[in-house]
Image (cartoon, helix red, strand yellow):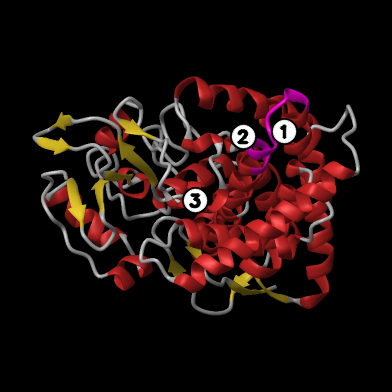
Amino acid sequence: MSNAPVFDIDTAAFHKDPYPFLERMRATCPIAYVPALDAVLITKRDDVFTLEKKIDVFSSDQPDGLMTKLMGQNMMRKDGEAHQIERKAIFPTLSPKTVQTVWEAQFKAATQDVLNTLTPLKTADLVKDFAMPVSGEALKAMTGLTQMTWQEMDRVSQGMIDGCANYTGDPEVEARCHDCTASIDDHITDCISKGIEDSDMSLIAVQCRAGLSDAQLRANVKLAISGGQNEPRDAIAGILWALLERPEVQHALQSGTLGYLQVFEEFTRWISPIGMSPRRIAKPYRYNGIDFQPEDRVFLMFASANRDETYFEDPNLFNPWRDTSKSVPFGAGPHFCAGAWASRSLIVNVALPMIMEAFPKMALSGPVDFSGWAFRGPVKVPVVW
């Protein structure tokens, strides 16, 4: 077991708002063992940036990890050549070119359908009524699971996310996760049984053509759903809340002195939708006076790295004019998020500008609370227009 100093947390308070805890850790013990999570948390930006790339020690291969047990061993839980083979196999789906030439038009069409439904209502919850269907429809297209409803896409994504963050071992959470993975498997089987067209660029299709095994294909589709639904959903709804709280940011966007990409990159620094990535220690290692032992569990805390005072002045403030080049919202090493281009396209080029143009007088109509630490987003964003 690591000799890292012990840092205790209140798990309920940490789930409600991890940032005060992480700030204290950065100041007093930036690498610390947290008993409630049974993991060593790494909280400083430079440490996260450096150690994420040292895959011979900080391994993604976690046979006893929750994600592997619940979803199968996807490419995110592999290192080296095994990881690169599967990453190369899915690249045709998520490449910048495919996103631009295939998916973005479909994102726009689906988003317009959602806006058409909302227009006469004059009120909505931006999480449930906008971000959730927009993200779900995008993921349906990219995975190839077009027969799945967006509601089911969101349900199974959330079920897996909850399962993978179930470090307290709640049996009900685990049971819901199993139900969700079974639903995905049924939909994958149905999709494959109908045949794959040569022009199909979906995740299922490109993995079939690349010759990946059935187990590899299914695990990687589940991986895409677990992160590919909640991250855009939470970022879309969260950014819209931030814009509605800051009229001066809206004015800058309207005048062209600020871009949606700047807003996106600052928000994902400020409130990271994916707050951490777990690792397993593969061999003894010493770093900054801390001894890591084989099989120790380590969490690379992206959410904390992105508020590191060393690089970001007033890091707890949302400031879309700041330099975010040192932030790591999508990771920094070989496991850099493969869906980053698709996420930026959906959020920056489609969802944000389309809804702000459709409802220029949109305003908040109630309080907004965020929750989560491994994955974080707003629970509800009520608005009127």
- The answer to whether residue 95 is visible is no
Q: In what quadrant of the picture does the C terminus appear?
A: bottom right
Q: CA distance from mark 1 to mark 3?
A: 31 Å
Residue 103 drawn at (x, y percent): 77, 38
Q: Which residue is mark 2?
A: 341
Q: Which residue is mark 1?
A: 99
In the rendered structure, which disc, 1 or 3, sits on the residue that comes first in sequence? 3
Q: Is residue 253 left or right of residue 165?
A: right
Residue 362, compared with residue 83, is above or below; it is below
Q: Is residue 318 left or right of residue 293?
A: right
Residue type, numbered disc 3: Lys
Report helix, strand or loop for mark 2: helix
Crowd class of label 2 (few under 14; some 14 to 19; many from 20; radius 10 Å):
some
Q: Nearer the viewer, mark 1 or mark 3?
A: 3
Please identify the dominant SS of the magenta region. helix
Residue 315, compared with residue 158, is above or below; it is above
Is residue 210 on the magenta stretch? yes
What residue span does the magenta drawing correspond to?
Answer: 209-218
In contact (CB < 8 Å): disc 1 and disc 3: no
Report helix, strand or loop for mark 3: helix
In contact (CB < 8 Å): disc 2 and disc 1: yes
Residue beneath the point at 60% across and 27% down: 86
Q: Nearer the viewer, residue 344 or 81?
A: 81
Q: Nearer the viewer, residue 78 or 93?
A: 78
Residue type, numbered disc 2: Trp
* Mark identifier at residue 69: 3
In the rendered structure, which disc, 2 or 1, sits on the residue that comes first in sequence? 1
- The answer to whether residue 326 is visible is yes
